[in-house]
């Protein structure tokens, strides 16, 4: 008994020694582990929101407020009509600042009138979202729902597409900007100062930015046509480049300005890995301008009524009578309203696959007027 009693003071003494240290630690720790931070909406909209001027990281008027129990900070602001740029800064200084996509780049904002916006910054992703609060029709009615029907393409009706022109999206490799060609812009097609020419974007750039694309809510990327194009068409003031992908010469390889077939495989694999589909746009109703009429001057459209097709032996025929059946034998010299020729000997073999170089597989009726039988 006496032995047990004797121990008690020793234990108390030990506690007395430890306790002041523990208390000191408890009071000091929160300040070190989670310093009180501030998150501020900054930009050219700050003067409109009550700050002394724009781009003021220390203007507390546009501070966001921490959402309890969440990783987000938020505030609702009313922005008057105008064009603005914005980002968020931390701790009332420029040392750490983030644009809406989590990078350092400012975000654009254009509003046509007083607009109430919910601003939410997430400290885990560093992304900021702006959500309009008073959009008309925000209360969905039964009539609205009846209008929002599923697509007839049932498998795609829930996809959220991001339509993307690789040449204008992100330049992942400057090595391919000229498409492996040499010379000026009329040879290579490259001129980033002209909207009608290649600007340098490529599939590598898309692959590098897949997280950004997915962050927009994308479930499927729709690429503009990506096969190898005739780099430049037209002449003089009408010259422009195939950055859009609609002047295909080779249906078996990616346009060298955009990258390689391997780059496309990588993009598709990486997109799939992130849960996104990739839609590959292929133009099948025309190719690059390679064939031209031998007849000099302009080439207005010549209709089938006035200029019927002719078989190689000269017999007139209507192509509609040969749907699903073998086509009659044709002769490029006699079968068509205009006589198809190639601009250069090289053009006669430029298309891949090779059967596309057969001029009798084209209408050879002159310039389309986009109406009637020649409408695309
Ligand atoms: Ca301003
Ligand atoms: Ca490039």
Image (tube, rainbow, N blue to C red):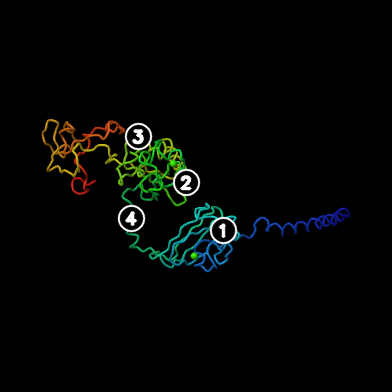
Residue 14 vs residue 150, the one in the foreground: 150
Q: Position of residue 365 (x, y in %)?
A: 19, 41
Q: Mark 3 or mark 4, which has the lower sequence index?
A: 4
Q: Mark 4 or mark 1, which has the lower sequence index?
A: 1
Which of discs 4 and 1 lies nearer the camera? The answer is 1
Q: Which residue is drawn at the image coordinates 20% and 45% (left, top)?
A: 374
In the image: residue 176, left or right of residue 68 = left
Which of discs 4 and 2 lies nearer the camera? The answer is 2
Is the Cβ of the residue at disc 3 closer than 8 Å to that at disc 2? no
Q: Which residue is drawn at the image coordinates 32% and 36% (left, top)?
A: 249
Q: Inspect this view and state whether residue 222 appears.
A: yes
Q: Quadrant of residue 306?
A: top left
In the image: residue 123, left or right of residue 165 = right
C-alpha separation, residue under disc 1 versus residue under disc 2: 23 Å
> Which residue does the numbered mark 1 point to in the structure image?
89
Q: Inspect this view and state whether residue 326 appears.
A: no
Q: Position of residue 141 (x, y in %)?
A: 36, 64
Q: Mark 3 or mark 1, which has the lower sequence index?
A: 1
Which of discs 3 and 4 lies nearer the camera? The answer is 3
Q: Which mark is residue 209?
A: 2
> Which residue does the numbered mark 3 point to in the structure image?
252
Q: Mark 1 or mark 2, which has the lower sequence index?
A: 1
C-alpha separation, residue under disc 4 versus residue under disc 2: 32 Å
> Which residue does the numbered mark 4 point to in the structure image?
149
């Amino acid at each position: 008994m006496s032995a047990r009693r004797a121990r008690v003071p020793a234990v108390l003494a030990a506690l007395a020694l430890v306790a002041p240290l523990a208390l000191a630690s408890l009071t000091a720790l929160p300040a070190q582990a989670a310093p009180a931070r501030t998150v501020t909406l900054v930009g050219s909209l700050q003067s409109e929101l009550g700050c002394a001027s724009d781009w003021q990281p220390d203007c507390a008027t546009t501070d966001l407020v921490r959402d309890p129990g969440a990783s987000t900070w938020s505030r609702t602001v009313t922005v008057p009509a105008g064009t603005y740029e914005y980002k968020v800064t931390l701790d009332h200084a420029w040392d750490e600042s983030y644009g809406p996509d989590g990078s350092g780049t400012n975000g654009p904002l254009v509003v046509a009138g007083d607009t109430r916006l919910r601003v939410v910054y997430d400290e885990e992703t560093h992304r900021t979202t702006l959500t309009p609060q008073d959009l008309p029709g925000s209360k969905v009615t039964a009539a609205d729902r009846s209008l929002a029907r599923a697509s007839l393409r049932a498998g795609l009706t829930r996809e959220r597409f991001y339509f993307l022109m690789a040449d204008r999206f992100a330049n992942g490799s400057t090595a391919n900007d000229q498409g492996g060609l040499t010379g000026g812009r009329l040879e290579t097609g490259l001129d980033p100062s002209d909207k009608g020419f290649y600007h340098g974007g490529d599939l590598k750039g898309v692959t590098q930015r897949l997280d950004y694309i997915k962050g927009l809510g994308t479930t499927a990327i729709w690429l503009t046509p990506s096969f190898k194009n005739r780099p430049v068409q037209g002449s003089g003031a009408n010259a422009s480049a195939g950055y859009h992908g609609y002047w295909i010469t080779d249906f078996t390889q990616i346009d060298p300005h955009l990258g390689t077939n391997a780059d496309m495989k990588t993009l598709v694999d990486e997109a799939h890995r992130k849960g996104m589909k990739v839609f590959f746009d292929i133009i099948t109703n025309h190719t690059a301008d390679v064939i031209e009429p031998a007849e000099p001057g302009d080439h207005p459209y010549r209709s089938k009524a006035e200029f019927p097709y002719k078989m190689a032996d000269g017999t007139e025929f209507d192509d509609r009578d040969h749907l699903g059946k073998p086509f009659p034998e044709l002769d490029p010299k006699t079968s068509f309203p205009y006589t198809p020729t190639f601009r250069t000997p090289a053009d006669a073999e430029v298309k891949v696959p090779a059967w596309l170089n057969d001029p009798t597989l084209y209408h050879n009726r002159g310039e389309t007027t986009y109406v009637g039988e020649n409408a695309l």
